Amino acid sequence: MAFFSSDIRTIDDLFVNTLRDIYYAEKQILEALPEMIGKAGSRPLRRVLQAHLKEGRDHLKRLEQVFRLHGAKPKHVECPAIDGLLEEAIDIDGKMPNKRVIDSALIAAAHAIENFEIARYRTLVAWAKELGRDDCASVLQQILEDETAIDRKLGVVSGSKSR
Amino acid sequence: MAFFSSDIRTIDDLFVNTLRDIYYAEKQILEALPEMIGKAGSRPLRRVLQAHLKEGRDHLKRLEQVFRLHGAKPKHVECPAIDGLLEEAIDIDGKMPNKRVIDSALIAAAHAIENFEIARYRTLVAWAKELGRDDCASVLQQILEDETAIDRKLGVVSGSKSR
């Protein structure tokens, strides 16, 4: 099963399946972040990635809350998009001598990951509202705002390196 | 070779490699869009996807211009992120009876693709400026603005379906 599977018939099916897709994505991001933090050369970048890690754990709990509110099981579905995005971050060679190049590559990879999450949460908020689930929409909106804030902080970190 | 490869040593290497990554991504998107257009049920969505297809062809030419300005060869590097994102769009079953569900899934997939492109072009504009290549930054900024406009149009289309 992935983002779109053969048993999807309604917006509700699409909503639940996409919740499972981002639930998987958030878990994969949590697994990848410690390696990204380990490669980061600058303290401000490490701090932003550490904040992302901390918030990611909280987002998993909030997603479980949305599953409960909606009466759906918190399962995973495959998400080849996040697998591809994380492959980029993992591929960055943390042992090369030029730490500025490593940090620039890490920031670029992290921006792409954040933008993916932002696209998903925007979609989920819209579908929750369409389904009349303002309770779910409200929780998802909070996560969306956290992700947007992390993306802004990444921009500040890259700016502080005169990018 | 992918987003980060073993021969990257400088921001210039990173810039050229990421140009090649988005050059590959734009070509893959151009290949996938006719299938997405074929599945779209509503005319406004088809129009936005058709505009994306038209602009995508133009973006390839502008990327080739950036390669020329920077004295680099317009080659491809693998981009597992766009491969994963397009897999989602291709997986959407265009034969299911509920066209509204198909369109909602297509809009969600297209938003994720646009957000990926926006992240890449923002990064490329920043790196071009860091390298003192305002000529390249200017062309990349124009593409970034087109991508942002397409993303906004997708939002309008989804809004017109009361999402």
Image (cartoon, coloured by chain):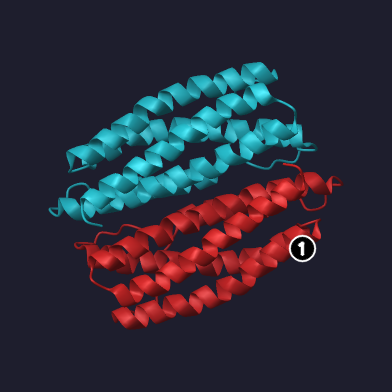
Chain colours: A cyan, B red
Q: Is residue A127 visible?
A: yes
Residue lying at 36% horizontally and 36% vertically, measured from the top left = A32
Would residue B144 be found to the left or right of residue A42 on screen? Answer: right
Label 1 SS: helix
Quarter assignment of residue B14? bottom left
Please tell me which residue lies in front, B151 or B84: B151
User: Residue A93: x, y in percent?
Assistant: 24, 50
Mark 1 chain: B
Residue lying at 18% horizontally and 53% vertically, measured from the top left = A100
Quarter assignment of residue B110? bottom right
Please tell me which residue lies in front, A44 or B60: A44
Residue lying at 41% horizontally and 74% vertically, measured from the top left = B139
Please tell me which residue lies in front, B149 or B28: B149
User: Residue A97: x, y in percent?
Assistant: 12, 53
Number of marks present in the image shown: 1
| Residue A112 sits above or below residue B70 on the image | above
Give the quarter of the figure containing the N terminus of chain B: bottom left
